[in-house]
Image: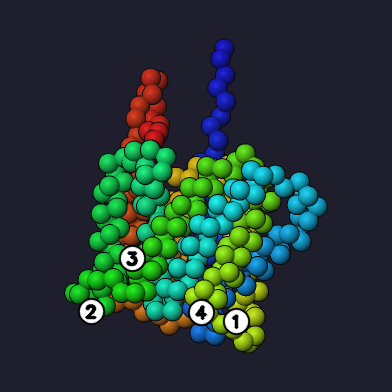
Amino acid sequence: MKTHASPPPAFGLPELALIAITFIWGGTFLIVQHAVTVSGPLAFVAARFAVAASIGALVCRGQLRHLSKAELFTGMLIGVSIFGGYALQTYGLMHISSSKSAFITAFYVPIVPLVQWLVFKQRPRPAVWVAVVLAFVGLLLLTGTDGLGLGLGKGELITAIGAIAIALEIILISRVSPQLNILRVTIVQLATASLIALLLMPVMGEAPPALSKTFILSVLALGCASALIQYVMNWAQKRISATKATLIYAGEPVWAGVIGRIAGERLPGLAIVGAILIIGAGILSEWRPRRLRADGKAIAASD
């Protein structure tokens, strides 16, 4: 009699780990918003990821001797996308609330399939196109300053562009990290993001910040958070698909919205509708119709 291997659980440790970091990730928006009142965005990004890279190097200092060229190149490539996403997000937080920033950043969820199509020629399913339209409408509602004037301000536009960089980061991690040592790749990508920000400071005319209590505590807190977030992302995405990971990440702005509301932020009615549309678009973009197997059991359609 033939036996069939049990399918992997739909919800295991990798999924739980990603949910945990979405909560941590959601809380970082408010911290960054306070930090950029005492620091330029590039200086903060440089310091934040320098701390994160140092923590990673300290934890696995014995493994760095075995860093391969493939791990170095991969880490640098992911690091560029991390810099783009976080630097633009930090710039945006100088102009918009943490809750709004988080929901706009969630725009990367339906963007991921489109980037995969453009870069890797994976044609999106019809549901993805509907999701992108919903997300765009949600983005306009979320950014409408008077409830009727639907337009992108400076902070919203910068944050939306940053969401595209984050989409690219997620795709790259899923594409290249399964074959490499995740600890070494994580350290390289964090150090790369920090170095790019540091090198761009004089180019952009940004002066080093004063070492205030707010700056130091924010850098230390987010440095630890960034090290944990990037490592868990790399670890979990070796075990689950980019599709499932992206769907879990869609919960991050919900946590940010809750934390922002506790801190006193209030979104107008249409903005809340827009936020719901963006989250709904993220869920729809990962939805797959069920199809029947030969034995009559329903399974999810593959990409």
Q: Secondary structure at mark 1?
A: loop
Q: CA distance from mark 2 to mark 1?
A: 36 Å
Q: Secondary structure at mark 4?
A: loop
Residue at screen point 40% across, 20% down: 295
**Tag 4: residue type?**
Gly
Residue 82 vs 200, above or below: the answer is above
State the image coordinates of residue 5 (x, y, percent, origin top left).
57, 26
Q: CA distance from mark 3 to mark 2?
A: 16 Å
In the image, taking residue 285 as reference, residue 176 lies left or right, namely right
Q: CA distance from mark 4 to mark 1?
A: 10 Å
Given this view, does label 2 or label 1 mark the residue nearer the observer? 1
Colouring rule applied to residues: rainbow
- Name, please, the residue furthest toward the left: 148
Q: In this figure, which residue is indicated by the disc labeled 1?
A: 208
State the image coordinates of residue 76 (x, y, percent, origin top left).
59, 53
State the image coordinates of residue 110 (x, y, percent, origin top left).
36, 52
**Quadrant in the picture for residue 17:** bottom right
Q: CA distance from mark 3 to mark 1?
A: 35 Å
The numbered mark, 3 or 2, whose residue comes first in the sequence reads 2
In the image, taking residue 175 as reference, residue 107 lies left or right, namely left
In the image, taking residue 284 as reference, residue 71 lies left or right, namely right
Residue 39 vs 127, above or below: the answer is below
Given this view, does label 2 or label 4 mark the residue nearer the observer? 4
Q: Report the front residue among 301 and 234.
A: 234
Q: Report the front residue among 28 and 88.
A: 88
Q: In this figure, which residue is indicated by the disc labeled 3?
A: 275
Given this view, does label 4 or label 1 mark the residue nearer the observer? 4
Q: Secondary structure at mark 2?
A: loop
Q: In this figure, which residue is indicated by the disc labeled 2?
A: 146
Residue at screen point 48% across, 62% down: 84
